[in-house]
Image (spheres, rainbow, N blue to C red):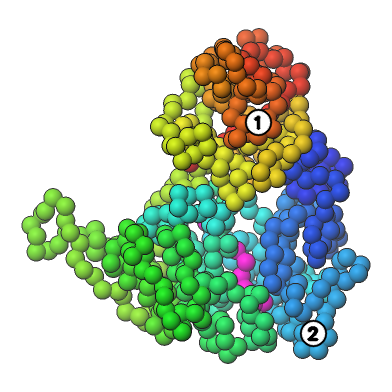
Amino acid sequence: MDAASPSACPHCFGDLTSTPCPHCGWRPGVDNPAPALALGTLLDGRHRIGRVLGHGGFGITYLAWDENLHLRLAIKEYLPRDCATRAPDGVSLAVYSGQAGEQFAYGLDRFLEEARALARFDQHPGIVTVKSFFRAHGTGYCVMDYVEGLTLKQYLERQPGGRIPVEQAWRLLAPVMDALRAVHQAGLLHRDLSPDNIYITGQGRVKLLDFGAARFAAGEHSRSLSIILKPGYAPEEQYRTRGKQGPWTDVYGLAATLYRAITGTVPPEALDRLDKDELVAPSQLGIVISSDQERVLLKALAVRAAARYPTMHGMQEAWGAVARAQEKPAASVPRPESPKPPSVSAAPASEPEGASPNRSGRFGLGGLLVLISVLALVGLSQIDETDDSPTPLRPVSPDLISGRYQPLGPDGAIIEDTTTNLQWMRCSQGQHWNGDTCDGEAAKLTWDDAMRQARGLSFSAWTDWRVPTKDELLTLVYCSSGQPKWKGHGCDGDYERPTIDQVAFPNTPDSWFWSSSPGADGSVSAWIANFYDGSGGNGHKSSTVCVRLVRAGQ
């Protein structure tokens, strides 16, 4: 795909075969919101700006297209909103005068220094690779690998109650802790740990994003900290102009992230805890956690830095000691059926940062188990499209849409059928989910175009979307008359059209939809379902038919 081609979407750089964009929903006339750079802006003579990936008090991160290498990248622009704004030319920055100007210059130097330092970790599996950095238009830019997937925050939002079991959360965060130890040993800190800055890639790897050197710079030179710090995740020393920060600062942020992952709630803000500590222990919230594990977590979340583990290694060692103790039977009991672990106290508070990594935190067999567990979490397995047998059903729940459908993510653009474990786009290709319904008209594509567009499509951070098999498509047919259907037979009696759950899949055309299964005529036809009457049949591949994409669920 050539980003200079008129067939490329300027928002996501996918093939723009129809509007709205079938990949991201972009429409002509829609641009990035101010003060972000406009779509199509060219930086450094090679980086074409696309959609905004994220923004905060000190910068904006964009999806970009490298016109030399022909690949997607992420570019972070240094733009502290208390110190500068976008100039009238729409590209350069207008820096405020006085102290704000001094803060801007100091922060910019630190921004570029940290980009240079992080580039040394290009081979670390837990850190997003920094490709390059440069100055332009009165500010600085950091060019990084673009990784597709979803943030830990997005992943947790998809889980029941917004949380996951304790052991699962610890395994998921283990690569993050290893990455932080490497960064700390190089004399750097992250300073902005939260579920927003931990990423689970499409390959199941966990990576650390968005280091906060600029935040530290401003912390020493500015009183406007409320725009920088994330309440609940930032320790008290980050709120003080001269608060001493170190690895213990990231220990707090990591522990707060772990607390959020296992309880579904964010810890109280650190400054509020200084006045009156109302942090609720996970066990008091009904979370299954051992008393020793909870002791380690609460020590890492201590309000005062002196009471925390001073290093990430210290926290890992303390947790590892608990895990090893729980694996052993009590010495005083001769081989009981269910051995009870002895009570184990937390590890000493002080551990040397340069100490060798704990065995459970290193890669190898343990790392492989972590990766396997994360792959299971993210749900990257695919269903065999050659299997023509009906997908087995699981019991339904009355708390779901029609007792079976569960909307996913913060905007609900994806829905999971809990009876088949399949995740569907709620809108047909060509339509756009606005948060409540599907806008626009469904696109009609030939079978070849439908299959081609599905390959490599990125939607809601997933890249394994595909055209469903015929039996998968048939599971969506709903006959409101109550008359059953199966294997191509349509609805009977007095039924509503379209023959699909209209709450789960609003604004669905009462028309034909492609499957990936071959038709009776082999290579020239494919099986199609008709959501006018719930029937099925064969369609010539040159016909133009609607498409709804699916992926395997978790």
Residue on which disc 1 sits: 548
* Label 2 residue SS: helix
Q: CA distance from mark 2 to mark 1?
A: 52 Å
Q: How many marks?
A: 2
Relative vertical location of residue 430 with respect to residue 340 in this rendering, above or below: above
Relative vertical location of residue 86 with respect to residue 276 in this rendering, above or below: above
Relative vertical location of residue 351 with respect to residue 27 in this rendering, above or below: below
Q: Amino acid at mark 2?
A: Gly
User: Is residue 189 in view from this perspective?
Assistant: yes
Query: For this view, does 325 lie left or right of residue 188?
Result: left
* Label 1 residue SS: loop
Q: Residue at x 52, y 37 (%)?
A: 401
Residue on which disc 2 sits: 101
**Residue extending furthest toward the front:** 494
Judge depth for marks 2 and 1 and give the one in front: 1
Q: Residue at x 48, y 21 (%)?
A: 390
The one of 302 and 371 positioned closer to us in this rendering: 302
User: Is residue 217 in view from this perspective?
Assistant: no
In the rendering, at what x and y percent does residue 177 appear? 47, 66
Q: Is tag 2's residue or tag 1's residue first in the polypeptide sequence?
A: 2
Q: Amino acid at mark 1?
A: Arg
Residue 435 drawn in magenta: no
